[in-house]
Image (cartoon, grey):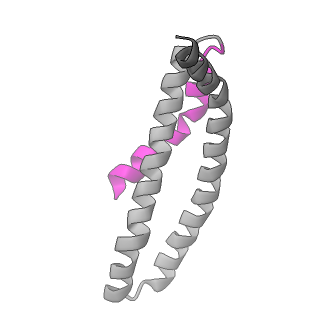
Amino acid sequence: MLIPHGLFRSAFDNTAPIIAAVAPENAKHRAEVFSYFDNLLRFLDSHHGSEDALLWPVLLERTPAAEVIGRVEGEHEEIHAHRMRAGELLRRGARPLLARRRSCLSTG
């Protein structure tokens, strides 16, 4: 658990400088950054979904730490709200890229 959680913290802590380094006119770099964060958010969804569905029920059966698991589930809900906001911002920023890609495909 430490490895994926450390990965998420590191990746999200570095969000601002990664995005700031993208020149608005550099569509290729913007697309790469979009893909990176899209994959990161999907990995977060998968990771938390598997913890919620598989790990917490087993731990609740085997340990008396219900309050800790309840706290972590609450953290997941809070993180999920931030994740949804980040996903919307990511999609909003990707719209010009997607429109350009559709335009190229339809005229090319």
Question: Does any portion of residue 104 appear in the rendered image?
Answer: yes
In the image, is 54 to the left or to the right of 37?
left
Question: 63 or 97: nearer the eye?
Answer: 97
Q: Residue at x 61, y 31 (%)?
A: 16
Residue 91 lies in magenta, yes or no? no
Q: Quadrant of residue 60?
A: bottom left
> In the image, is 37 to the left or to the right of 1?
right
Up the image or down, 64 lies above or below 46; here it is below
Q: In the image, is residue 8 part of the stretch drawn in magenta?
A: yes
* Residue found at x 48% / y 24%: 32
Residue 88 coordinates in the image, percent (x, y): 66, 44
Is residue 90 rendered to the left or right of residue 9? right
Q: Residue at x 46, y 47 (%)?
A: 42
Does the magenta stretch mainly form a helix, a strand or a loop?
helix
**Magenta span:** 1-24
Quadrant of the image containing the N terminus: bottom left
Residue occupying the point 46% across, 42% down: 40
How many numbered dots are placed on residues in this image? 0
Q: Is residue 42 left or right of residue 89?
A: left
Q: Whole-percent x and y of residue 67?
A: 51, 83
Q: Position of residue 62 (x, y in %)?
A: 31, 86
Q: Quadrant of residue 106?
A: top right
